[in-house]
Image (cartoon, rainbow, N blue to C red):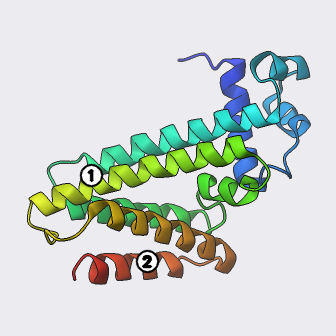
Amino acid sequence: MSVVTTKERLLETGLGLIHDRGYHATGIQDILAAAGVPRGSFYHYFPGKEAFCLAIIDRYAEQGYRRLDGYLGASESAPLQRMHRFFEDTRAFYAAGKCRRGCLLGNLGQELADVSDACRRRVNGHLESWTRRFAQCLREAQDAGELAAGVDPDDYAAVLLNSWEGALLRMKLMRSVEPLDAFTRLYFDSVLAS
């Protein structure tokens, strides 16, 4: 059994609270109370709330990278099947959560882009990394003959991620997976098939 450090407890608790409530609606005291950690411990690890948020952004993104890389790296399946499976399973995850949370990167990007340049840059950097991962999978699809040679994988990956993040926003607003279903239908059945 692994020992959870105070810093880990703060990050896990903070990630959950900020994902549920948002950055501005989650105070440091809320995080401390939920984590059962004294105030001095927070400032031992983080100089302030923005630095804490940057660490949460990184933590969430790293968890997402591991998950995405597991799907995209499953070489026993064709590249487009791997991508499709990722989105289908992610859709099921959001459906099970009653379409409430969405993507923390997208949520914080919308909430903090005009308030914290450091958070804006960090979120954008992680979204660019996601885009590069999708572009690589699309290149593999081209190499396998699943995708037309004239398609620009970088452009298609950017449209993919931008569309998905928009669909997640609409999912939260509508409390329905229909925007995710529409994204999957259009992207995989129309955009990639053309």
Determine whether, in the image, residue 175 is placed left or right of residue 63. Answer: right
* Whether label 2 touches label 1, CB < 8 Å: no
Q: Mark 2, residues whose alpha carbon is within 10 Å: few (<14), some, or many (≥20)?
A: some
In this rendering, position of residue 32 left or right of residue 104: right
Above-or-below relation of 190 to 26: below
Residue at 17% x, 48% y is 75
In the image, is residue 116 above or below residue 167? above
| Circle 2 residue | 183
Front residue of this view, candidates 180 and 120 = 120
Query: Which three-letter amino acid code belongs to the residue tagged 1?
Result: Gln
| Callout 1 crowding tier (Cα within 10 Å): few <14, some 14–19, many ≥20 | some
Whole-angstrom CA distance, mark 2 to mark 1, is 20 Å
Q: Residue at x 60, y 16 (%)?
A: 3
Can residue 85 be spotted in the picture?
A: no
The quarter holding residue 190 reads bottom left
Numbered disc 2: secondary structure: helix
The spot of residue 164 in percent (x, y) is 48, 68
Instruction: Note whether residue 65 is visible.
Output: yes
> Which numbered tag is attached to residue 100?
none
As helix, strand or loop, the secondary structure at mark 1 comes to helix
Q: In this rendered view, identify the residue nearer to me: 134 or 93.
A: 134
Check disc 2 and give the amino acid type. Phe
State the residue at coordinates (25%, 45%): 73
Instruction: Find residue 72 and report its horizontal and vertical position in percent.
Output: 28, 51
* Residue 136 image label: 1
Residue 46 screen position, x and y as percent: 77, 24
Q: Earlier in the sequence, mark 2 or mark 1?
A: 1
Q: Quadrant of residue 134?
A: bottom left
Image position, residue 169 (x, y; %): 62, 70
